[in-house]
Image (spheres, helix red, strand yellow):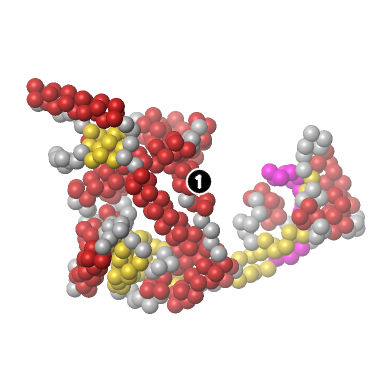
Amino acid sequence: MMKTRQLLLALLLFLGATADAEPLLIDRVIAVVGEDVLTLSDLRHEAQKLEQRLRQKGVDPMPSAGAIQKRAFDTLLTNKLQLAEAARLGIEADEDTINRAIAAIASNNGLTVPELRDTLEAEGMNFESFRESLRDELIVRRLRDREVTNRIQVTKSEVDSYLERSGGLEGREAVQLRYILITAPDGASPEQREKARLLALDVVERVRQGEDFRSLAQQYSEDQTALQGGELGWLAVNGIPPLLQPYVAKMQEGEVQGPVAAGRGFHIIQLVDVRGSANNIVRQTKARHILVRTNEVTSDTDARQRLMQLRERIIQGDDFDTLARSNSDDKASAIKGGDLGWSTPGNLVPAFEEQMDLLGINEISPPFKTQFGWHIVQVMGRRDYDATDETRRDQARKAVRDEKAKEALQSYLRRLRDEAYIELRLEDIAS
């Protein structure tokens, strides 16, 4: 640690001497983060990228240059800390993973990888720099999954409680919200917390008096959405953070609620718009199947031939149930005569659903292959099913999980900061 600091000091002295000798535009260190550094050029580059993204999103009004720089610095600092922690834990992103991610990005944009490279370079972005940024992103994602996301558990009672709180939202499909977070410092004294509360009250009153919520969000909010004017965009009803649900349930369009005291500070929301909801009716299929897996003994040809013979026996009058019990390699369904029960679109693998959807009632498919092996499937019935309750529970479970993950991530990042060696050198940062 000391050796690194001495080297940095020597570097800064050298740069200072060079600057005295000749008026050159030079880079400099603005922060020491563990064994790494942040430079002024890093900050300027990140701030330029952030400003470009905000303009592409049509943010209006645009935040000040100082606010953009502050967010850019926080992003760089947090990223350095996460990458250092990932390195300590041995978390990496191998070349094959990066290549697949690049191919997926290209495909999602209707491009080949060479075309993606050309497009990036035409926009002034070095492809190798893009690749390294993607590597860092994948590493950080794996770190967060391992240390935070995969540890989140959601109980049935939490889902029930969430749905109970959101009862007043029935009839609404989605809401458009704006959000401001006024925080008190970690370990805040009663006086500091009261100061934050009074500021939040003042912000609420100023909105109610006609000031623009978005401008106030850019000025005061400490949430990640601050630079976008606090815009949360359209949220499905069960995607509303649990803390805010009881308030949104009672709000009318244009109304402001807050400050809500919880967690890190005080929360303020504005309901911008509402979309009505309808029941979620889905077409379900009841089917049964026989699976033959391939291995060293059973080839694709053998599996297909065996299923063709079983299909012919069923057509000639043999009992599907009996043949599934004695021949299917899917043990979970075999004991039920191959019965898969009622399935909703998306429950089964696409290749299986594609074949199943082509069949009429009681029709048996020819043998076909999925990632699990070779199948024949028979459709036993179809029905329109009101899956509204199941959908609401699934969405509620996801909302609770997302909220808990967000809180856990913020706590994790604060711990990384608290435990890290950070030396700030921010004099004349905006110069």
Question: SS class of the residue under badge 1?
Answer: helix
Q: Quadrant of residue 256?
A: bottom left
Magenta stretch containing residue 245, yes or no? no
Asked whether 40 or 296 is in front, the reply is: 40
* Residue at 46% from the left image edge and 47% from the top image edge: 144
Q: Residues within 10 Å of mark 1 (few under 14, many from 20)?
A: few
Say whether residue 337 is left or right of residue 414.
Answer: right
Q: Quadrant of the N terminus?
A: top left
Asked whether 317 or 96 is in front, the reply is: 96
* Residue at 41% from the left image edge and 57% from the top image edge: 407
Asked whether 271 or 377 is in front, the reply is: 271
Residue 1 visible from this viewpoint? yes
Residue 97 at what x, y percent from top left?
51, 35
Q: Quadrant of residue 271?
A: bottom left
Residue 418 at what x, y percent from top left?
34, 47
Q: In this picture, which residue range is highlighted in magenta?
A: 363-382
Residue 282 at what x, y percent from top left?
61, 66
Q: Which amino acid, by three-letter code, is at mark 1?
A: Arg
* Residue at 22% from the left image edge and 53% from the top image edge: 62
Residue beneath label 1, please?
146
